[in-house]
Amino acid sequence: MSTVFAVTTALLSAAALTTLVRLVRGPVALDRIVALDMLLTLLVAGTAVGVAARDESSFLPVLLLLAILAFIGSVTAANLIERREGMR
């Protein structure tokens, strides 16, 4: 079972690396916002894999907090984009 966790962690790390590239190189602000949201989602997934690998539930509140922060960030970014489009 540890190979499953290792492969999952490697794939999540590769996805986070490509997301960081998009976050840095994104030509517009919307690309950076979506990349930051994706990075938070990958962080939640990585935390969930870590919780499952260690078989302890003490990190579940951290997992819940990260998921809530990712959701609030997505809603805030959507609101910002909607306001910018309304100003044009």
Image: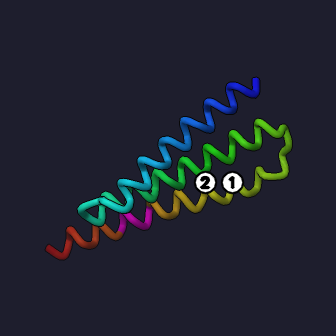
- The residue at 48%/42% (across/down) is 15
Would you name the residue on which mark 1 appears?
A: 64
31 lies left or right of 9:
left
**With respect to residue 78, does 18 lie above or below?**
above
Name the image quarter holding the N terminus: top right
The amino acid type, in three-letter code, at marker 1 is Leu
Q: Are marks 2 and 1 in contact (CB under 8 Å)?
A: yes
Q: Disc 2 on helix, strand or loop?
A: helix
Q: Tell me the distance, in whole angstroms, between the alpha carbons under discs 2 and 1.
A: 5 Å
**With respect to residue 64, does 72 lie above or below?**
below
Structural crowding at the residue carrying mark 2, measured as other residues with C-alpha within 10 Å and reported as few (<14), some (14–19) or many (≥20): some
Structural crowding at the residue carrying mark 1, measured as other residues with C-alpha within 10 Å and reported as few (<14), some (14–19) or many (≥20): few
- Give the image quarter of residue 2: top right
- The residue at 58%/62% (across/down) is 69
> 63 or 11: nearer the eye?
11
**With respect to residue 44, does 87 lie above or below?**
below
Q: Disc 1 on helix, strand or loop?
A: helix
State which region is magenta.
75-79
Picture coordinates of residue 32, whole percent (x, y): 35, 61
56 lies left or right of 65:
right
- The residue at 67%/32% (across/down) is 6
Would you name the residue on which mark 2 appears?
A: 67
33 lies left or right of 50:
left
Picture coordinates of residue 39, whole percent (x, y): 50, 53
**With respect to residue 26, does 56 lie above or below?**
above
Name the image quarter holding the C terminus: bottom left
Picture coordinates of residue 56, whole percent (x, y): 85, 43
Query: Is the magenta region chiefly helix, strand or loop?
Result: helix
- Specify how the rendered protein is coloured: rainbow
